[in-house]
Structures are given as C-alpha cells and as structure tokens.
Image (spheres, helix red, strand yellow):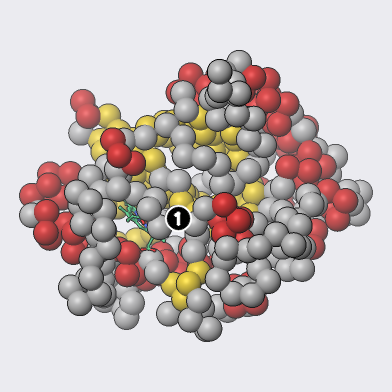
C-alpha cells in the first residue's frame, strides 16, 4: 500500500499540481471587532487545514492566505512587507488590467473538490460577520493541464528548489518577512466563440507554443507579441526571472461563462507587474498580447503571503503595537546553505537586487 503523502503545510506556495482549487477574495469589515476576529483567525488556519486534510490522506489539501496592502495597515500596522502596495493597473481603453477590491485571499487547493469545499466552509464560518466575500471562483483541472483556451498551461513553471528560489523572500532581503511571498490574482473571461474561430496556427502564434503537443515555437516563427514572448523576462545579467503560476479554468457553460483564474507567486511583485505591463501595454508599447483580444480581466488584486510562523504570530499583533511580535523568530528556517540551487545565478541571490527599487527587465 502506498504510504499517505503528508499534507502540505498551509502557506506553502508551491504544492504539487492539484485537480481542484477555490479562490476566495474578501474585504475585511470596517469595525474593530471584525479586525480582531480576522487577526484571531490567523492562528486557526493551519489547524483547520490539518483537521480537514487528515480526512483524505492523499488529498493534497493546502491553503495559502494573503493580505492586501490596505488590509495589512488596518490589521497589523508597522512593520510591513517592503514591497506590498495596492494593485497597479496597466493598459488603457478596452485592454486594462483592472484593480478591484480585496483585503484577503484564500487559495485552497486539493485533489478533490469536497476537500476544498469543506476547508473553505470551515475557514469562512470562522470569519462570519468579519469579512464580506467579493469574489469566489471554483476552478477545475482541465484535460492534459489545458487552460480554457485549449493550450497546456503551466509548462514553463519552475519546480522544486528553483520554484522556492523565485517565490520565497530571503532573510537578507526583507528580514522580518523572510519565508513569505507575493501573490497576484486576476479573473479573466474569454470570448470562446472568437477564439475558436481562429485557426489552430493563428492560436499557436498568439500563445507561442503548439496546441496539440505544447512545444515552444521556433524563435524564427514565434511573434514577439506572443504570450510566451511577452511573459519571458530576463534581468540585467541576462538571467531569466520566473514566477510560479497555478491558473485554473472555471466557468458556467449554461450561462456562456468561460474563464481562467490567473494566480502568480513571486518573491517580489515586480516581475509579475512587468509581465502585466508587457501584456497590456506591449513590449514595445503597442506590441501587446493578442490573447487579450479574446480575454479580459474583470478582477485584479495583489497580496502578501506571510510564512506560516508569521501568520500565526500575526494573531497577536495590532496596529500601533509594533515590536509586540518578534518576526525574526517567526521566520521559518531557510533552505540549508549546502542545498544546491537549481536556479540560474550564483548562491540563490539572483536578481533580488534588481527586483527591489525600480527594476526593469528585458
Ligand atoms: C487569460 C489568462 C491566461 C492564460 C489563459 C494563460 C495561458 C498560458 C499558456 C497556455 C502558457 C504556455 C504554457 C506555459 O508555459 O505555461 C502560458 C505561459 C506563461 N504565462 Fe500565461 N496565461 C494567462 C495569463 C497570464 C498572466 C496574467 C501572466 C503574468 C502576469 C502570465 C504569465 C505567464 C508566464 C510567465 C508564462 C511562461 C512563459 C515562458 O517561459 O515561456 N500568464 N500562459
């Protein structure tokens, strides 16, 4: 008999690919009692996830909780994550990456919808009266890992230590928030009739990969406005900067709704924002992502994901009470120094210098 896989820790950004995911975005109600309830809830998340996860040993249940910039200030005050800011909009006219309300993100993943449903129910029951849900999406894994638009999605994601390298904040870059991450979400709706009216070859030029076999188009034929070209970034040293995506298709065929929930994790919001700028404004401006002729973003929010120890410590924290939580103690252990980094660049410190301040990518 196969031994049960351990339930991944909540707040673990890169988990194995799951069959199901729930995305809940909520605002925290204005009154002090609601803020106190959300703070207290921070200490419950891991226990609830463990309790629910135990019921299906191989179910791969996990939950990531994130806080927006405004929510952080209202709930916890200073100190705050160095790069946390409100969602930045990109684009104009018909093509805009819109910013929409959202203080709290729950990203619940599992191999069974019932596990996601049960954990979402338990977590939201504890938050009753303290938050208002502004968006909730139940995503499903489509055939062959295909996005709603029929192309395999997630192929170029980094995995293992490389994924950690690109998503986990290091102790040297933002010491009180080491082990944390940033996450950006957008809900996209597709014009599937328009998309399906394109030839497969035209769709492949939009994405930059073949549809059936998911092979990258040769540089000689791949347009510079293809989705994969515009979302490929390199830093000043020519090293590629990646993010970890776990997009999910969702929809209601009976209502003509066909969507992709985009979710991207990184150790700084900067590379994800640069990708958005390339897609919506274009690289160079005007050379935008043609996927956006058939997809429009209806939500957009940015969150900070505290490490699990910090999330628990936040339960005791209040604005104006800086210093009551020793976040250095709350930071999880970093990967052992002897662990080889699969990421490009030396000693795992790649690019974070360039991710801070006003980074530019090619
Ligand atoms: C309508 C929503 C979206 C859909 C359906 C979609 C779909 C895809 C597909 C099919 C691929 C190729 C396979 C792969 O490597 O995963 C891809 C690649 C990628 N996408 Fe998206 N995507 C969407 C939005 C976004 C957004 C908003 C971003 C970033 C802000 C993004 C970032 C990336 C990146 C970094 C890659 C890998 C590029 C490479 O290294 O070749 N995607 N996406």
Residue 248 falls left or right of residue 64: left
Residue drawn at (51%, 47%) of the image: 101
Q: Secondary structure at mark 1?
A: loop
- Residue at (23%, 66%) from the top-left corner? 217
- Residue 334 percent coordinates (x, y): 76, 56
Q: Residues within 10 Å of mark 1 (few under 14, many from 20)?
A: few
- Extreme residue in the right direction: 324
Task: List x then y, in percent, for residue 253.
Answer: 22, 29
Query: Where is residue 100 shown, x and y percent of the image?
Result: 47, 50
Q: Is mark 1 within 8 Å of ligand 1?
A: yes
Residue that protrudes farthest toward the top in the picture: 55
Name the residue furthest bottom.
236
Q: Is residue 233 above or below residue 325?
A: below
Q: Residue at x 63, y 35 (%)?
A: 8
- Picture quarter containing residue 35? top right
Question: Which image quarter is the N terminus in?
Answer: top right
Give the residue at mark 1.
157
Is 24 placed left or right of 123 in the picture?
left
Q: Is residue 290 visible?
A: no
């Amino acid at each position: 008999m196969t031994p049960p896989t351990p339930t991944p820790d909540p707040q673990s950004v890169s988990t194995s690919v799951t069959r199901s995911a729930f995305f809940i975005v909520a605002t925290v109600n204005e009154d002090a009692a609601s803020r106190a309830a959300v703070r207290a809830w921070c200490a419950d998340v891991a226990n609830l996830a463990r309790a629910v996860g135990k019921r299906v040993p191989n179910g791969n249940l996990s939950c990531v909780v994130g806080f927006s910039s405004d929510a952080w200030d209202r709930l916890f005050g200073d100190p705050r994550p160095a790069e946390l800011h409100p969602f930045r909009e990109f684009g104009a006219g018909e093509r805009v990456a819109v910013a929409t309300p959202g203080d709290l993100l729950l990203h619940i993943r599992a191999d069974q919808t019932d596990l996601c449903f049960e954990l979402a129910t338990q977590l939201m029951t504890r938050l009753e009266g303290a938050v208002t849900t502004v968006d909730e999406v139940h995503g499903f894994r489509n055939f062959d890992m295909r996005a709603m638009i029929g192309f395999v999605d997630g192929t170029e994601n980094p995995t293992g230590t490389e994924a950690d390298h690109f998503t986990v904040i290091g102790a040297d870059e933002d010491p009180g928030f080491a082990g944390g991450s940033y996450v950006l979400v957008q809900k996209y709706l597709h014009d599937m009739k328009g998309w399906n009216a394109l030839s497969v070859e035209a769709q492949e030029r939009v994405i930059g990969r073949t549809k059936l076999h998911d092979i990258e188009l040769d540089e000689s034929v791949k347009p510079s406005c293809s989705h994969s070209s515009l979302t490929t970034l390199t830093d000043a040293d020519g090293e590629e900067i990646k993010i970890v995506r776990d997009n999910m298709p969702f929809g209601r065929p009976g209502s003509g709704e066909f969507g992709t929930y985009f979710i991207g994790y990184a150790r700084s919001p900067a590379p994800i924002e640069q990708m958005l700028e390339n897609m919506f404004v274009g690289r160079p401006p005007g050379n935008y992502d043609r996927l956006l002729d058939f997809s429009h973003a209806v939500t957009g929010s940015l969150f900070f994901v505290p490490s699990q120890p910090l999330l628990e410590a936040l339960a005791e924290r209040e604005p104006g009470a800086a210093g009551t939580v020793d976040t250095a103690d709350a930071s999880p252990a970093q990967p052992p120094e002897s662990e080889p980094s699969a990421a490009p660049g030396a000693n795992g410190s790649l690019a974070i210098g360039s991710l801070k301040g006003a980074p530019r990518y090619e």
